[in-house]
Image (cartoon, rainbow, N blue to C red):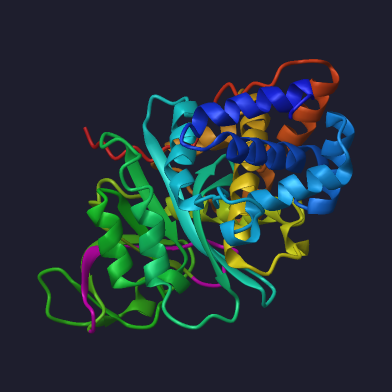
Amino acid sequence: MLRNKYLKDWSKLVSYHFPHLSLPEVVGLATWSFGIVMTGSSSLTRLSEFIAKINGEKRNTVRQRLKEWYQDSKDKKGAKRRELDVSQCFAPLLKWILSLWKSEDKCLPLAIDATNIGQNFTVLSLHVLYQGCGIPVAWKIVKGTEKGSWKPHWLHIFHYVKDVVPDYWQVIVLADRGLYADWLFEVICSLNWHPFLRINKQGYYQLRQEQEWRCLDTVAPKTRTDWSGYVTCFKDHSLECTLLARWDEGYKEPWLIVTDLELTQAQSFWYGLRAWIESSYRDIKSDGWQWQKTRLREPDRAERIWLAMAIATLWTVTVGSEEKSHQSQQFNEQQNPDYRINSKSELRKKTREISCFLQGLINIIADLICGKTISLKGLFPRQSFSLNTS
């Protein structure tokens, strides 16, 4: 079925990391993810045209095969057709990422967030944060107009990745203030991971061993503030935690972050890593896979395309980071506990001219044109948040 050398090589690599998938599922996943990278698009029409050209097939034949890959079983032809269970791919995907992680410090930054595709979809996703990018590892897609709590969906996401990361790794989970909930804090702690959740400045807190309640908006009253303490947050649904407050110049308001880490372990500037998930959304949308143009309307089908885009993202980010592995000065500064970002202008000066994602796209195309083999050598994280205090 696969005649193109590079497509066959990529299929073998995908099959190795997703051994539970059937041959048609592997071929479909490999073809989709390969085509996404080659065309810079998640469009069925564009991929069908491209794969047909390189594989010596008719376009309609390829189109039908690619379409059946993301369809539900009831929509496929044949008596033994089955649908791909995306949830069963989350753990293998995260294991693949960890196998590429080249760092003595086993520190893994994760972030959760939600993004919308107009009124069509809301995507709830968990990403590994890496060198200014984010690699999706688990997600749930719901209709944009769907009402109800997101709690079951987040529990679903965490359930499928909870046993993947070894216990000796240090994991922090970052989330913006719109997602904060006391149950989310508790769930993350139950995984032996560390919540790093931003909260709103409305409400009250109480210093440990004190009776007085204070307004949260007084923790960081002005810029150039960096404060931390053991507190009880909120009068209702109270939370015993460590509170971090930080207000840098150039920002409209401070960061208020709750975590279970000790004061000697946590650094408020780690929250700056959360912005990398926003870069991930740009890679999936306008900078990369053009997901914002999707014509899909069924969440289950969209979740399967997200699997192909996640693997495509892993490929590009990995290859792009190899090119940048020697340029570590701006990330080495984050390993210094005294490091501070003093302004947005200073941050811009330390930002690479081209992201790992875009560098990876360039490198992959160039490598294949030059006849090089497909290879994912490793991920080289430069951020560090080692929790050891010794």
Rendered residue at 37%/49% (across/down): 172
Magenta segment includes 243: yes
| Position above or below: 119 against 136 | below
Rendered residue at 86%/37% (across/down): 52
The one nearer the camera, 98 or 60, is 60
Give coordinates of residue 316: x percent, y percent.
67, 35
Rendered residue at 41%/74% (across/down): 221
Residue 179: image quadrant is bottom left
**Left or right for 352, reference 389:** right
Can the viewer see residue 126 in this picture?
Answer: no
| Position above or below: 264 against 145 | above
Rendered residue at 82%/37% (across/down): 51
**Left or right for 51, reference 357:** right
Give coordinates of residue 365: x percent, y percent.
81, 29
The span shown in magenta is 236-253
| Position above or below: 169 against 308 | above
Can the viewer see residue 34 in this picture?
Answer: yes
Magenta segment includes 369: no
Give coordinates of residue 71: x percent, y percent.
64, 57
Residue lying at the far left of the rendered structure: 209
Quadrant location of the C terminus?
Answer: top left
The one nearer the camera, 190 or 270, is 190
